[in-house]
Image (spheres, rainbow, N blue to C red):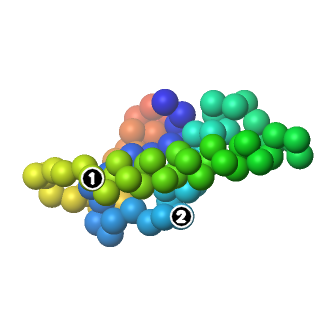
């Protein structure tokens, strides 16, 4: 999985449409190999981003869990701790 794509499910506050779109953009960039598509491929690239964002939003809206929602601050702290362990100074 691409390092820049983060889990979006079960967070408080809930995921925004912008976060879903950014994750979709990152996914399409990874799959296509384009950071920025050429003019000839731009329409297909943006259509793919829109379709994946819509599917992701639908998926996230239909998922159910009994666990308590995570907070972005706690997850960021865990990521920093993992990075400090992985890359000690």
As measured in the structure, the alpha-carbon distance from the residue carrying label 2 to the one carrying label 1 is 18 Å
Q: Is residue 41 above or below residue 59?
A: above
Q: Is residue 15 left or right of residue 45?
A: left
Image spot of residue 12 (x, y percent) = 29, 66
Label 1: how many Cα within 10 Å (few below 14, some 14–19, many 20+):
few
Q: In the displayed image of the protein, which residue is found farthest to the right?
A: 39
Tell me which corner region of the image, top left, top right, bottom left or bottom right, holds residue 40. top right
Dot 2 crowding, Cα within 10 Å, few <14, some 14–19, many 20+: few
Which label was assigned to residue 22?
none
Locate residue 17 relative to residue 71 in the image: left or right. Answer: right
Residue at the location (45% across, 47% down)? 55
The residue tagged 2 is 18
Q: Is residue 80 visible?
A: no
Q: Quadrant of residue 2?
A: top right
Left or right of 77? Residue 88 is: right
Is the Cβ of the residue at disc 2 closer than 8 Å to that at disc 1? no
> Looking at the picture, how far across and down is residue 1, in whole percent?
49, 30
| Residue in view at x 67 percent, y 39 percent | 29
In this rendering, the answer to whether 50 lies above or below 84 is below
Residue at position x 21%, y 59% in the image:
69
């Amino acid at each position: 999985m691409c390092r820049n794509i983060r889990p979006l499910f079960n967070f408080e506050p809930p995921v925004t449409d912008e976060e879903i779109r950014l994750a979709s953009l990152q996914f399409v960039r990874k799959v296509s190999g384009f950071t920025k598509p050429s003019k000839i491929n731009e329409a297909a690239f943006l259509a793919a981003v829109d379709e994946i964002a819509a599917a992701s939003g639908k998926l996230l809206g239909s998922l159910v869990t009994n666990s308590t929602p995570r907070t972005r601050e706690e997850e960021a702290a865990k990521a920093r701790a993992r990075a400090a362990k992985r890359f000690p100074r």
